Amino acid sequence: MKSAELTELLGVSVSWFEPYKTKRDAMALVTVTKNESERSVLISPRGLMVVDSNNYVMPPYERNVKSKSRFVLVGQRVAKSITWGVLGVLCLFSIALGTNLAQARVVLTDSMSPAIKPGDVLIATKPNFVAPEKGKVVIYTGKRFNGTIVGSFSHRIIGGDASNGFIVKGDKNESADVQRPGISDIEGVVLFTIPFLGLLLTPQNLTLLLFCGFGFWLIYDAFRMSKR
């Protein structure tokens, strides 16, 4: 009797043999998959009932993979590779910054425009690792004539040497700086610049990014759950 009912509900010929020994409350799930369609029937002491198999068992991994298009799979792999790459770079930067092998500075003025603009982040290393020379941008400690420290400046070396001091100048400035910093005044030699990153490193922007990220995560999680 159950074989005929299963055949009618599933749309294929099914032969059901009742187990010789079984528990009174035992149930069985029969699923037939054809192309993109799937039909499941739950056999219980109450009888036969058409159900959604996802509510009872986890679908096999192969089915999930096949249900996704090649474009989606490639996109997921690319996104995963980019994510791991970014995490790797961030870990390396964290180690370099934590061990003082590198330093990060946010540019506040436009004295180095257009090469370096306000809001850019400079990644620099100590002059022990990269020698300051003509053409390189250095971060040096600015001082008054009496030796009082004014602050840090990021300008380009246009002349001089380590013995007599370097001649530095902002690309946008008309004349060179009055001070000629020596090796002891140079805090770092700029390796590269990350544009506009400093504009995001304010408390207001970081808070906004945090809330936006949390919101996107909630939307993604809700969308993912609806697909199950």
Image: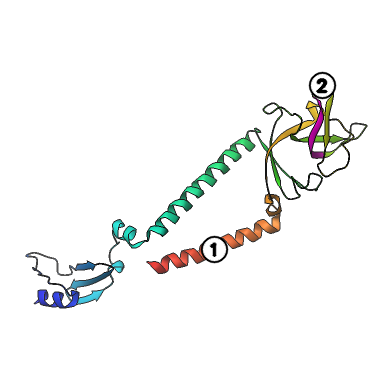
On residue 163, which mark appears?
A: 2
Which image quarter is the N terminus in?
A: bottom left
What amino acid is labelled 1 in the image?
Phe
Q: How is the image coloured?
A: rainbow
Quick check: 98 above or below 86? above
Q: Residue at x 82, y 34 (%)?
A: 168
Element type where label 1 sits in the image: helix
Q: Position of residue 43 (x, y in %)?
A: 18, 72
What amino acid is labelled 2 in the image?
Ser
- Name the residue carrying label 1: 216
Q: Position of residue 49 (x, y in %)?
A: 21, 76
Asked if residue 155 is among those painted magenta in the image, a careful observer would answer: yes
Which image quarter is the C terminus in?
A: bottom left
Q: Quadrant of residue 74?
A: bottom left
On residue 195, which mark appears?
A: none
Number of marks present in the image shown: 2
Q: Quadrant of residue 23?
A: bottom left
Magenta stretch bounds: 152-161
* Majority SS type along the magenta span: strand
Q: Residue at x 52, y 62 (%)?
A: 217
Q: Residue at x 88, y 42 (%)?
A: 174
How many angstroms separate mark 2 from mark 1 (CA)? 56 Å
Q: Position of residue 80 (x, y in %)?
A: 46, 51
Q: Quadrant of residue 8?
A: bottom left
